[in-house]
Amino acid sequence: MADKSRPSTLTVYLYVPNIIGYIRIILNCFAFAICFKDKYLFSVLYFISFACDALDGWFARKLNQVSTFGAVLDMVTDRISTACLLVILSQVYRPGFIFLSLLALDIASHWLQMYSSFLVGKTSHKDVKDSSSWLFRAYYANRKFMGYCCVSCEVLYIILFLLAKKQTENLTDVLVNAAMQSWIYLTLLALILFGWTIKQSVNLIQIKTAADACILYDINKKQKD
C-alpha cells in the first residue's frame, strides 16, 4: 500500500520554490536573448531573476518545501546566469581573461563545495561550521552578509555591462571614469567592490576547503579498508 504522506515526484517538481526556479530560468533566457538589443530591459530582467533567488529560499522554509532538487536547481541557475553574463563581459572588455577567470573560479568553487558536502554526508553545502576559516563561516552563517556580497557581485557585473559602449572597452578606464563622476558613484563603487572582493575571497577559500575534504575522505576510506 502506498504511503499517502510521501510526496510524489511530480509534487516535488511543483513545489512553489521550484516553480520560482523555473520562472528564473525563463527570465534569464529572455534576458540574454535581448541583452544587446535592450541593455536596460536585460538588466531589469536579470536582476529580478537574481532577486528571486532569495524568494525561493524563503518559500522553501516557510512552506516546508526544502528539497535536494530545489537546492541543485537553485545553484545551477545561479551559476549558469552568472557565467553567461561573465562570458558577455569578456567579449566587451579588455582584458577579457579576467572575466573568464572569475567564471572558472565561481563554477569550480561551488561545484567542489557541493560535491564535497554530499561526499561527507552533509545535507547542505552551506554547512561549514567545521571550517577553520572565520570568513568562510561568517559568510554562510549570516544571510544578510552573504546577500550583501552576492548582490555586490551581480550589481557590479550589471553596471559594467551598462557602462560598456563598445566591444573593446578597457576595464580600468571604465571603472576610474565611473568613480570620478561624483562622490556618490565613488562611494557606491567602493561598497560594491568591497562586497565583490569578499565574495571572490570566499570562493578561493571554498576551493581549498572542499579540496581538503575530498582528500581527507580518500585518506579515511583507505584507513578503514
Image (spheres, helix red, strand yellow):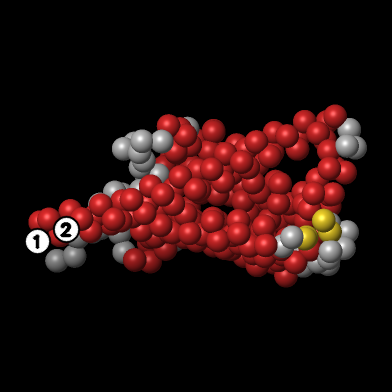
Say which residue label 1 marks: 225
Give residue 186's position: percent from left, percent from top: 81, 34
- The front one of 214 and 20 is 214
Look at label 2 and name its amino acid.
Lys
Q: Which residue: 75% across, 37% down?
A: 189
Mark 1 neighbour density, 10 Å: few (under 14) some (14–19) many (20 or more): few
Question: What's the residue type where badge 1 is placed?
Answer: Asp
Q: Are marks 1 and 2 in contact (CB under 8 Å)?
A: yes
Q: Secondary structure at mark 2?
A: helix
The answer to whether residue 121 is above or below residue 30 is above
Residue 152 point in image, percent of width and height: 65, 42
Q: Does the rendering let one see residue 125?
A: no
Q: Residue at x 33, y 55 (%)?
A: 116
Quarter of image, res 175: top right
Mark 2, Cα crowd under 10 Å, few <14 / some 14-19 / many 20+, is few
Q: Is residue 108 above or below residue 123?
A: below
Q: Quadrant of the N terminus?
A: bottom left
- Mark yes or no: residue 173 visible: yes
Tell me if 156 is positioned left or right of 124 in this view. right
Which sits in the foreground, 155 or 190?
Answer: 190
| Secondary element at tag 1 | loop
Using residue 98 as the reference point, say whether residue 107 is left or right of it. Answer: left
Which quadrant is the C terminus positioned in?
bottom left
Measuring from the top left, give residue 76's x and y in whole percent.
Answer: 50, 61
Q: Quadrant of residue 35?
A: bottom right
Q: Residue at x 31, y 51 (%)?
A: 213
Nearer-the-camera pick, 79 or 90: 90
Task: Please state which of residues 46 and 149 is positioned toward the viewer in this rendering.
Answer: 149
Mark seen at residue 134: none
As drawn, is 149 to the left or to the right of 60? right
Q: CA distance from mark 1 to mark 2?
A: 6 Å
The residue beneath circle 2 is 221
